Amino acid sequence: MSDLNQVILSTQENFERISDVSFPKEAEFAMQSLSANSFLMSTAVKNPISLKSAIVNLSACNLSLNPVLKLAYLVPRGGKVCLDISYMGLMKLATDSGSVLFVQASVVRKSDEFTLNGFGLAPTHKHDPFSIDRGDIVGAYVVAKLATGEYLTEVMSIDAILDIRDRTEAYKSVVAGKSSSCPWTTD
């Protein structure tokens, strides 16, 4: 563990030159992530360069590994430690740039009324948020309001979402019984 701490600390100069985020806090969040996930830890021990790269990439994005913020994560994948930016992290990057005012993602259920109103316009999504049963999920969408006042909307059917889920290593691990949970089963 102390070797990994040294790997993380070796990124401090580059990190602080690039990022406005507090390096000591991020180093602590990285160590918390490593100690909470034995597979991540063993991946970092076997490939410390990938851990260093992930920390440097974090600084370049000016995001945080703070688990409360849920902006970015250190993830073991393919024998490497990778920096994964969450959808919340991507929204922060977009809004921090000033070109996007807000971003909202939502699921659409069978009993909801959803209308895609065309390019540059916000969709219409009517539903009772307090309803006990709005039906199965039929899809999801994300809408971003641009600084110009226009809206960008992207929609995805539940089949397309499940196709993506089924290709992820995390979900495959749960299906194979190698892991008890992943974001696809818990969130």
Image (tube, helix red, strand yellow):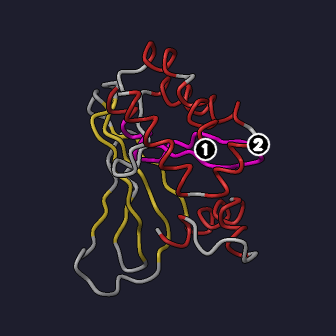
Q: Would residue 63 be found to the left or right of residue 164 on screen? A: left
Whole-percent x, y for residue 104 in the image = 33, 50
Can you identify the residue that label 1 sits on?
A: 1
Q: Nearer the viewer, mark 2 or mark 1?
A: 1
What is the CA distance from the residue labelled 2 to the residue labelled 1?
Answer: 12 Å
Of residue 64 and residue 7, the one placed in the foreground of this image is: 7
Where 147 falls versus 1 (above or below)?
A: above
Three-letter code for the amino acid on which mark 1 is drawn:
Met
Mark 1: secondary structure: loop
Can you identify the residue that label 2 sits on?
A: 46
Does 74 appear in magenta?
yes
* Snapshot quadrant of residue 181: bottom right
Whole-percent x, y for residue 24 in the image = 39, 30
* Snapshot quadrant of residue 141: bottom left
Where 43 falls versus 146 (above or below)?
A: below
Q: Which residues are magenta?
A: 72-92
Q: Would residue 181 be found to the left or right of residue 132 on screen? A: right
Whole-percent x, y for residue 162 in the image = 62, 67
The answer to the question of whether label 2 and label 1 lie on touching residues, with beta carbons closer than 8 A, is no
